[in-house]
Every structure is written in structure tokens, then in C-alpha cells.
Amino acid sequence: MFTSVLMIEKPLTPADVEFVTTLHGDDPVSFVVLMQPRGSKDRLLRAIDDIALGELEQATQEGDEPEGREALEPAEQALTHSVAALQAAGSQARGHVVQRRPLEVLRGVVEETRADEVIVLTAPHFVEEFFHRDWASRARHKVGVPVLKLFSHAVDEDQTTAGG
């Protein structure tokens, strides 16, 4: 069985689930999902990314997003939703919320599970990517397995997800 460590920052959409579960054709895949809650230190970078994407209204609402401990419950819900969606698609999946040192946790999970790859599924983060400070760029130097960076699919307003 192929093992992928999947790093996410938002609940998986149906399109995301289909995307990651079909990457390896008909080969069975097991996922370990790592979900990291939002942090206040990222607020400015998220706002700049929103502006770069032309989402001015979203940029002004960054301060309204839960952060730190307030973000823990939504992160748990997003993780539960995402693991269940992967399982419903026929994959083995488990996961946990990462509160501190995500790259160290990632390296430990890769070693423990003998993962074949890391998939970082994220929204575009132009500033972090430009300076190679995004998860995928930093993980490539830490984990010893291929790191694939994919962009998550946006959730339509009429779609419902965990916590939303």
C-alpha cells in the first residue's frame, strides 16, 4: 500500500478528495492527514495573498478568522471531516491536528509510517512561496521523500463543510 502524508490547512472539498485519491490510479493509498490551525503570525501574509488574488474583501476580514486556541476546534472539525471524506472514498485515513513545529511533526510522521510521499494541499501563498517559506519548500529539505505541492479547490458558498 502507498502511504501519503497529507498536510492541509482547510477541510478537504469533494474535488480535493477526488484529486488526492486518484493521484496513483487504482493503487490503494493510505493517508495520514496533518491539519494545522491558523496562527496570528500568518495574518499579514494571508492578507497580502488575498490582495494579490484580487480578493480585497477577504483581505479585510483576516482579523475575523479564529486563531490560536480559538482555531483549535474548527481545525479538529476540519480534520474529522477530511479523514471521513477520504475514508468514504475508499482510502485508509487517520490524522491529527498539529499545534506546534509542523515540520518536525511531519518528519516524525514520515519516519514512523515509512511514508512514500508528502502532499501539501494548500491555497496559493504568493509571499511565502516567493521566499520559499511555504510548507512544501521547507519540507523538501526535511523529510527525505518526494514532496508534492497541490493547490486546494475553493469551496463554493453553497457547499457545506465541517464548521461551515
Image (cartoon, helix red, strand yellow):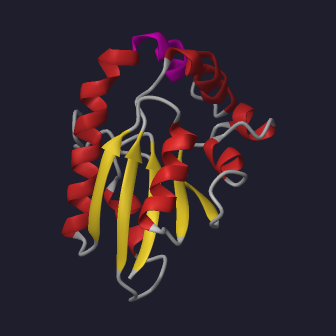
The range drawn in magenta is 56-66
Q: Residue at x 79, y 38 (%)?
A: 130
Q: Main secondary structure of the magenta part?
A: helix
Query: Going by the picture, which residue comes out furthest to the bottom?
Result: 26
Is residue 65 found inside the magenta-colored segment of the image? yes
Q: The N terminus appears in which quarter of the rendering? A: bottom left
Give residue 137's position: percent from left, percent from top. Answer: 71, 48
Give residue 8's position: percent from left, percent from top. Answer: 44, 46
Q: Is residue 66 visible in the rendered structure shown here?
A: no
Q: Is residue 21 visible in the rendered structure shown here?
A: yes
Q: Residue at x 67, y 51 (%)?
A: 142
Corner quadrant of residue 86: bottom left
Q: The C terminus appears in which quarter of the rendering? A: top left
Is 134 left, or right, of 24 in this rendering?
right
Is 27 left, or right, of 50 in this rendering?
left
Is 3 left, or right, of 87 in this rendering?
right
- Residue 133 lies, with reference to residue 20, above or below; the image says above
- In this orientation, which residue lies closer to the viewer: 105 or 40? 105
- In this orientation, which residue lies closer to the viewer: 88 or 136? 136
